[in-house]
Amino acid sequence: MSSFFQTSIEFLKGVGPLRAALLQKELQLFTFGDLIQHYPFRHEDRTRFYTVKEVAEKIDEVSIGIQLKGTLTSFQTIGTGFKKRLVATFKDETGTLELVWFQRINWVLDKIKLNTPYLIFGKPNLFGNKISIAHPEIEALTAGNERGGYLHPVYTVTEKLKARHVDSKFIGKLIATLLPMAKNHFRETLPAALLQHYALIDKPTALHHIHFPQTEALLLQARHRLKFEELFYIQLRLIKMKLVRQDKFKGMVFSDTTILTKFYKEHLPFDLTEAQKRVIREIYADMKSGKQMNRLLQGDVGSGKTIVAFTCMLLVVSSGAQATLMAPTEILAQQHYANLKKYSDKMGIEIALLTGSVKKSQRKPIHQALENGSLQILVGTHALLEEGVKFNKLGLAIIDEQHRFGVAQRSKLWQKNASVLPHVLVMTATPIPRTLAMTLYGDLEISVIDELPKGRKPIKTTHRYDSHRLQVNGFLRTQLLEGRQVYIVYPLIDESEKLDLKHLMDGYESISRAFPDVPISIVHGQMKAEAKDYEMARFVKGETKIMVATTVIEVGVDVPNASVMIIESAERFGLSQLHQLRGRVGRGAEQSYCILMTGNKLSSDSRIRIDTMVKTNNGFEISETDLKLRGPGDLMGTQQSGALDLLIADLGKDGELLKIARDAAAQLLEADPTLSKPENQTVRHQVESMKNSAVNWSRIS
Ligand code: ADP
Ligand code: MG
């Protein structure tokens, strides 16, 4: 670890204690290392100067800022009030154009002199037949800047920093001061063989060009190298964790398929889809392998994960071990229990449900049966994690809807078996793009059910404006008359909770007025858990026909008779969330519908989201679009992960590079699992220094 990069930025020329404190607070820049890794988010083209004549000729092509050199020959203040502006004539040897300021007019008049050579930078626009540049950057022409020849970095700064004159330019200057000082302290962080094989430039060169590239090509090379490194070390770490775990934790071997074969022959209620079969094979292979399984099962809502879970349980039960399924809510646990019990009863398998609301007197026999091994399958909620719950021999722990459980809870379940860890299967209905899955769950094996059972009618999705509410209600009426049930979902987002709650209540009232003879449920986050569960249960049983709710119903609830999902203010939901909500319908034999209600004004992102929903039912396609729109940090299920705090790579855009980096990491570890070969000492060193900084693994240290 080089202490140079640990030096506080306070000690860099031009910073000092006050600015250092500000930079720490606003941008989390503490050390020289942090500052060097405060990469610009774009560059301005200062490679060349344009002439006024060129600008006039190419005005249609110039879509970014450009630079010119010349003099200002006149100032003129035009208009009054908010139309007041300062117009200057700018002149070089080929012609003239206009510079315009709407703000800081006095500052310009005070500082800028006529007939003195300046360098100006800005984006030219054509107004009538006049070319003008609004609010150009302007600086005196000096020996240092008059030749151009570089790309100018633009850094993220906050308003607070700007107010204290710590702007992008200032940060650029600091980095320009720091880079030459750092020169002798840099060391390469990737092994030579990798650099050569993937044609990557060395680290010091990359760090120079990421800030001050002479050409676009150098900038791209620098970015490529730094992104590769970042992704490589994240993947290396994940794969290493997986290898260590596989090595360390033996798994129980389950290979007896008698019960399973019986189930397949006599009780399987439908033909499994090819995807279900493939996934089951993958899981069986793990459970026979003698290594502990840690697998993520991704499958869109309705893809049939439950039966997969059950068949895996059978394999365990066949060998006299136990299986458990943990769901995030009471309702879901009940539903799973009801489903699995149907199958279990046919097979003569003992199954029980354990949730928070199971009474003490009923718990005791469950605990006992669990401990003596006569209870074979236990379904439940968090209650499974309580002290008193002891398995005789837990062979498989299945966790439904991963994103509601933290990693800590996952491992708590594992520890239920003192000697040998159970196999762990995490099921999620949140489709995550592959690139993201590789990073978030890179330490797990991943299985995907990418196919819906045959004969499913795809949900019809339409977009309606609020002004069409009467027609929508008319449609609802026809569905209700046919005996169907309906969800109406309202957004509820923390900051505006009161207002949202009001919208929900208003919506409930107007729906009650429109359908006075229809029993209606309402469920929202402010209600007590029991009240919520009670209302949900009424809807599940079909006692109420309309469910007015916030997104609390999002996860897993299965009401096959519900055929319409209306999403109010749909423009306020993220794509994954819309998709999750839509997945609440289309579970029965009837044609189902999803209606996205919005106001008339839609932002372009909202429009893309709505159009995507109308266009496709494919969860993976939707999550890819979501990833592109929002970036990885905001996707569902990713919130709790620090792994996404990347310096330079973008999981939405760098999918290809991620795969390459992951392969490179896998190959390296395969050849040298302990990183002890001399040529991998760089990697070893880097991995060790990464251990200390939990969040980002490619930082210089
Ligand atoms: P999810 O993946 O959302 O948990 P479920 O396991 O609840 O999906 O399955 C949804 C519905 O599809 C259930 O009613 C289930 O019985 C049915 N199902 C599952 N697999 C098949 C299949 N291969 N063929 C026909 N129906 C299936
Ligand atoms: Mg399910």
Image (cartoon, grey):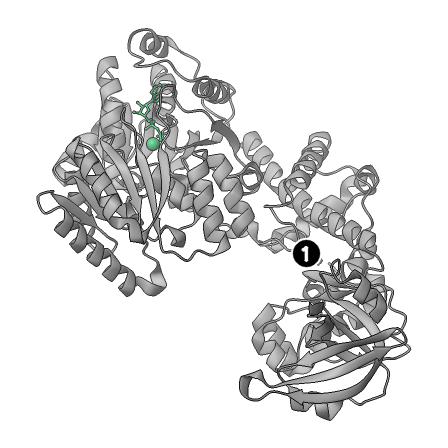
Ligand 1 neighbours mark 1 (CB distance < 8 Å): no
Q: Is residue 75 depicted above or below 224 in this figure? A: below
- In the picture of the structure, the residue carrying the numbered disc 1 is 699
Callout 1 environment at 10 Å: few (<14), some (14 to 19), or many (20+)?
some
**Residue farthest along the left direction in this orientation:** 517
In the depicted view, which residue is nearer to us: 545 or 290? Answer: 545
**Residue 156 location in percent, x, y?**
64, 67
Identify the residue at image location x=39%, y=54%: 572
Residue 405 position by quadrant: top left
Q: Position of residue 335 (x, y in %)?
A: 24, 32
> What secondary structure is marked by label 1?
loop
One can see residue 358 in this view: no
In this view, the residue in front, 188 or 645, is 645
Q: Name the quadrant where ligand 2 sits.
A: top left
Do we see residue 512 in this rendering? yes
Q: Residue at x 80, y 45 (%)?
A: 200
Taking the image as shown, residue 157 lies to the left or right of residue 111, namely left
Q: Picture quarter containing residue 304? A: top left
**Left or right, 344 with reference to 30:** left
